[in-house]
Image (cartoon, grey):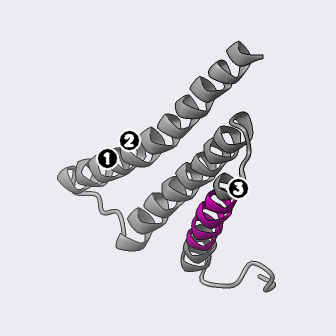
Amino acid sequence: MDHISKYIEYVAKIIEAAGVLIIAGGSIFVLIRSLFHFGKGLSMEYREIRQNLGRIILLGLEILVAGDIIATVSTEPTMQSVLVLAVIVLIRTFLSFSLQVELEGKLPWQKK
């Protein structure tokens, strides 16, 4: 059982690293793409660049939350670790909600 939890910890760290790489790599990709369009005389609107960055950050945050959940479940769950997880998930959920409202310009439950 000890070996399994060690592998689960590795999986959690890989998932967390993937979330960070998605945010960092995706942001660099969007910025380079916008510069490439600018160099060709094409224009990407500020809003389009901002929306693409927001989508990448949302995806990265969701993956980071999954990694945190796996990391907490794989270790022996203490009250402190569960509370830390709850705070992290609340903060990241609030960030995701705020980004989604910012990107769409409306609350999720409002009609189109």
Q: Which residues are magenta?
A: 82-95
Q: Nearer the viewer, residue 53 or 63?
A: 63
For mark 3, give the secondary structure: helix
Residue at x 65% of width, y 52% of height: 81
Identify the residue under disc 2. Answer: 25
- The question of residue 109 being in magenta is answered with no
Which image quarter holds the N terminus?
top right
Q: In which quarter of the view is residue 9 placed? A: top right
- At label 1, the amino acid type is Ile
List x then y, in percent, for residue 88.
59, 61
Which mark's residue is nearer the viewer, 3 or 2?
A: 3
Disc nearer the start of the sequence (3/1): 1
Q: Main secondary structure of the magenta part?
A: helix
Residue 70: x %, y % from top left: 69, 39
Neighbourhood count class around disc 3 (C-alpha, 10 Å): few under 14, some 14–19, many 20 upward: some
Task: Work out whether residue 21 or residue 83 is closer to the camera in this orientation and state it.
Answer: 83
Q: Position of residue 27 (x, y in %)?
A: 37, 51
Is residue 39 toward the left or the right of residue 95 in the image?
Answer: left
Q: Earlier in the sequence, mark 3 or mark 2?
A: 2
Q: Is residue 110 positioned above or below 62 on the image? A: below
* Mark 3–mark 1 CB contact (< 8 Å): no
Q: Nearer the viewer, mark 3 or mark 1?
A: 3
The magenta stretch spans residue 90:
yes
In the rendered structure, which amino acid carries the disc numbered 3?
Val
In percent of the image, x 57 and y 48: which residue is there? 64
Which residue is drawn at the image coordinates 62% and 41% (left, top)? 67
Give the vertical position of 61 relative to 76 (above or below).
below
- Furthest toward the top, the residue is 3
Q: In the drawing, what numbered circle is on residue 28?
A: 1
Find disc 3 in the rendering and name its residue. Answer: 82
